[in-house]
Image (tube, rainbow, N blue to C red):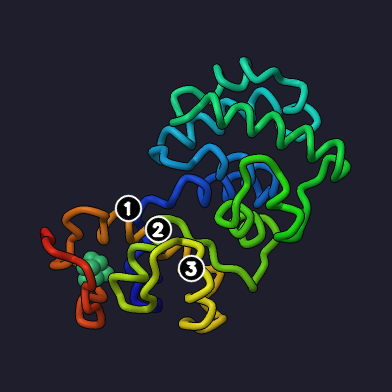
Amino acid sequence: MRALAKAITGLELPAVEKISNEQAEDPFQILIATLLSARTQDATTHAASTRLFRAARTPRTMARLTVKQIERLIYPVSFYRTKARHVQACCEMLVSRFNGRVPRTMEELVMLPGVGRKTANLVLILGFGSPDNICVDTHVHRISNRLGWVATASPDATEQALYRATSRRWWPSINLYLVTWGQNVCRPVYPRCGDCVIRRECPRIGVRRSSR
Ligand code: SF4
């Protein structure tokens, strides 16, 4: 993790990290940007989030937008129709049930439409500074398995296994480090093992072909 911390310096940050830095770690904007980010390129997520937040910056103002308006603002993120419905329903629930605030617990966060453990963990880490969570997306799941830290079949199983396999001090950083590494070096296909700073420690489990 120390080697990765050094190696990611200067690389492009993941979209939600960027939004978190730009928006003073506002939990609401982190929540919405994470909802938009699923299966979408970072540049597209960042541009769509910026357009949406320009139109509405709070749960109350965003809940007043129609699903069609949200669709138009977030297009072309993938599954933009479903995501627009989730964003609108999520904002309505934040207003009706949580007094217009993003809740601070996993149990409450996963009640929100479209919000699973990945999104909830990222909101808790980036929005509320929680030291107790690990956010596992597809990059974290893939790289943790390649490194042999875990041997799991799903991101949820990886999250639970990582709590056991890693030191608590790294938990909030695992997502940032591994997502950045996954987007730049340990890519899904043809990982750049020859350029990888942790190749000596990595058993490269499941990697059939790599490139420089
Ligand atoms: S050595 Fe290859 S498989 Fe292992 S972390 Fe680096 S890029 Fe990924």
Which of 70/58 is in front? 70
Against 194, is 190 above or below?
above
Callout 2 crowding tier (Cα within 10 Å): few <14, some 14–19, many ≥20 = many
Query: Ligand 1 near label 3 (Cβ, under 8 Å)?
Result: no
Instruction: Tell which circle, 1 or 3, labels the residue nearer the N-terminal end.
Output: 3
Quarter containing the N terminus = bottom left
User: Which residue in the structure is indicated by mark 3?
Assistant: 157
Question: Of the residues shown, which amino acid type is indicated by label 1?
Answer: Gln
Q: What element carries label 2?
A: helix
Q: Is residue 45 left or right of 60 when viewed as pictured?
A: left
Residue 154 x/y as whole percent: 43, 62
Quarter containing the C terminus = bottom left
**Residue at point 53%, 73% (across, down):** 160
Callout 1 crowding tier (Cα within 10 Å): few <14, some 14–19, many ≥20 = some
Against 53, is 8 above or below?
below
Q: Is residue 133 left or right of 184 when viewed as pictured?
A: right
User: Which residue in the structure is indicated by mark 2?
Assistant: 179
Q: What element carries label 1?
A: helix
Callout 3 crowding tier (Cα within 10 Å): few <14, some 14–19, many ≥20 = some
**Residue at point 86%, 42% (across, down):** 97
Which of 83/55 is in front? 83
For marks 3 and 2, give the CA distance: 18 Å
Against 161, is 105 above or below?
above
Q: What element carries label 3?
A: helix
For ligand 1, give the image quadrant. bottom left
- Of marks 1 and 3, the one in the foreground: 3
